[in-house]
Image (cartoon, helix red, strand yellow):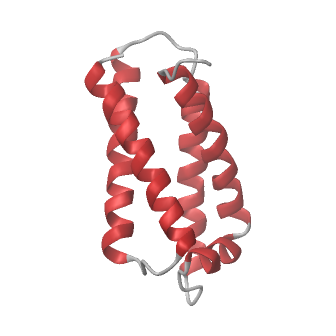
């Protein structure tokens, strides 16, 4: 069994975030309905912009997976930790918590945020 390290975490995050980003960019209404967000007005357009950011985060982490440890990579850990934890808090405070799909995202984002925080504190 392989040990969890930043390289493997960046690889998994890169693949998952890129995949979700593509789905969000091209099929925002589908994902918004699954999560329970309103598809009225400019919601899908706003969600597409969010998809671009998620896709960009996936490309960034996938590209940095084999880089040497540096202050830039440490800054990425801090940014990713902050993003995932704030996203988790945002979902808990502002979203309808009766949706099971949303709960799966809250758990996934919270776990990844905690793991990134661990690696940031560990200074790997």
Q: Is residue 28 left or right of residue 107?
A: right
Q: Position of residue 6 (x, y in %)?
A: 48, 23
Q: Residue furthest front?
A: 1
Front one among 13 and 18? 13
Q: Which residue lies furthest to the bottom in this view?
A: 40
Q: Position of residue 80 (x, y in %)?
A: 40, 40
Q: Residue furthest top?
A: 68
Could you tell me which residue is drawn at 65 percent across and 71 percent down? Answer: 31
Could you tell me which residue is drawn at 45 percent across and 56 percent down? Answer: 107
Could you tell me which residue is drawn at 61 percent across and 29 percent down? Answer: 11
Question: Against 60, is 49 above or below?
Answer: below
Q: Quadrant of residue 38?
A: bottom right
Front one among 79 and 117? 117
The number of numbered discs placed on residues in the rendered structure image is 0
Front one among 92 and 53? 92
Q: In this view, does 68 lie to the left or right of 18?
A: left
Q: Position of residue 118 (x, y in %)?
A: 32, 30
Q: In which quarter of the image is the N terminus?
A: top right
Question: Against 63, is 50 above or below?
Answer: below
Question: Against 60, is 82 above or below?
Answer: below
Q: In this view, does 69 lie to the left or right of 57?
A: left
Q: Where is residue 22 in the image (x, y as percent from the top left)?
A: 70, 55
Q: Quadrant of residue 35?
A: bottom right
Q: Quadrant of the C terminus?
A: top left
Could you tell me which residue is drawn at 38 percent across and 13 percent down? Answer: 70
Q: Quadrant of residue 40?
A: bottom right
């Amino acid at each position: 069994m392989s040990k969890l390290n930043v390289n493997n975490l960046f690889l998994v995050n890169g693949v998952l975030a890129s995949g979700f980003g593509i789905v969000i960019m091209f099929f925002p209404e589908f994902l918004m309905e699954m999560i329970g967000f309103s598809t009225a007005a400019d919601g899908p357009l706003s969600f597409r912009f969010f998809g671009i950011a998620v896709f960009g985060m996936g490309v960034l982490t996938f590209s940095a997976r084999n880089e040497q440890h540096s202050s830039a990579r440490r800054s990425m850990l801090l940014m990713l930790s902050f993003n995932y934890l704030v996203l988790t808090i945002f979902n808990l405070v502002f979203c309808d918590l009766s949706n099971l799909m949303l709960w799966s995202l809250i758990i996934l984002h919270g776990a990844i945020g905690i793991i990134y925080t661990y690696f940031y504190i560990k200074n790997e």
